[in-house]
Image (cartoon, grey):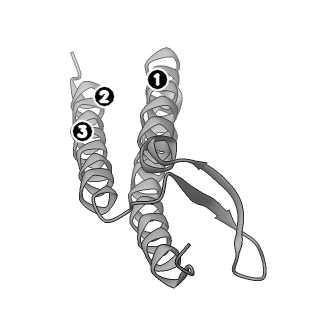
Amino acid sequence: MNNAPNDVIAATLVALAVGLAFIAGCAIYYGRQITSRRIPMQWGTDGRPAWFAPRFIGLWFSFGVTAAFSAFLLALALHDPQKLTALIVATVSVIGTNMWVQVHHLKRVIRWQSEAPAS
């Protein structure tokens, strides 16, 4: 019996665990520096916040999206083994992208917070 697909899925689960730990670590580390009750979730073309979310959602949204989307892709990979390679590549891409997005977003929120006029 060929264990290669199981090994690939196991390696992907390790990558997912590492990615989620990194994203959670960023939420905790950078979250300590964010004091605003509502934080920007997206910026407009003028560089100003387009919309805001409660602090908890702003800090943990990337974690939830990464976990949910990765679980969906892994379920598809288990359901259709012929597409295993493509789905694993997609899963790892989602994890890596969301790791970068989390760091970029939270650093941008901290910069926005420091530039905001004191009220």
Q: Are marks 3 and 1 in contact (CB under 8 Å)?
A: no
Residue at the spot 49% in from the left edge and 51% down from the top edge: 37
What is the CA distance from the residue labelled 2 to the residue labelled 1? 8 Å
> Which residue reaches farthest front?
119
Label disc, if present, on residue 81 of the rendered structure:
1
Three-letter amino acid code of the residue under disc 2: Pro
Label 2: which secondary element: helix
Residue at the spot 23% in from the left edge and 22% down from the top edge: 2
Percent position (x, y) of residue 55?
48, 48
Q: Residues within 10 Å of mark 1 (few under 14, many from 20)?
A: few
Residue mark closest to the camera, 3 vs 1? 3
Residue 63 in view (yes/no): yes
**Residue topped by disc 2:** 5
N-term mark: 3 or 1: 3
**Residue topped by disc 3:** 17
How many numbered circles are shown?
3
N-term mark: 2 or 3: 2
Specify the quadrant that holds the N terminus: top left
Label 1: which secondary element: helix
Quick one: 64 or 8, which is closer to the camera? 64
What is the CA distance from the residue labelled 2 to the residue labelled 3? 18 Å
Quick one: 95 or 25, which is closer to the camera? 25
Q: Quarter of the image holding residue 20?
A: top left
What is the CA distance from the residue labelled 3 to the residue labelled 1? 22 Å
Residue 72 horizontal side relative to residue 28, left or right? right
Q: Are marks 2 and 1 in contact (CB under 8 Å)?
A: yes
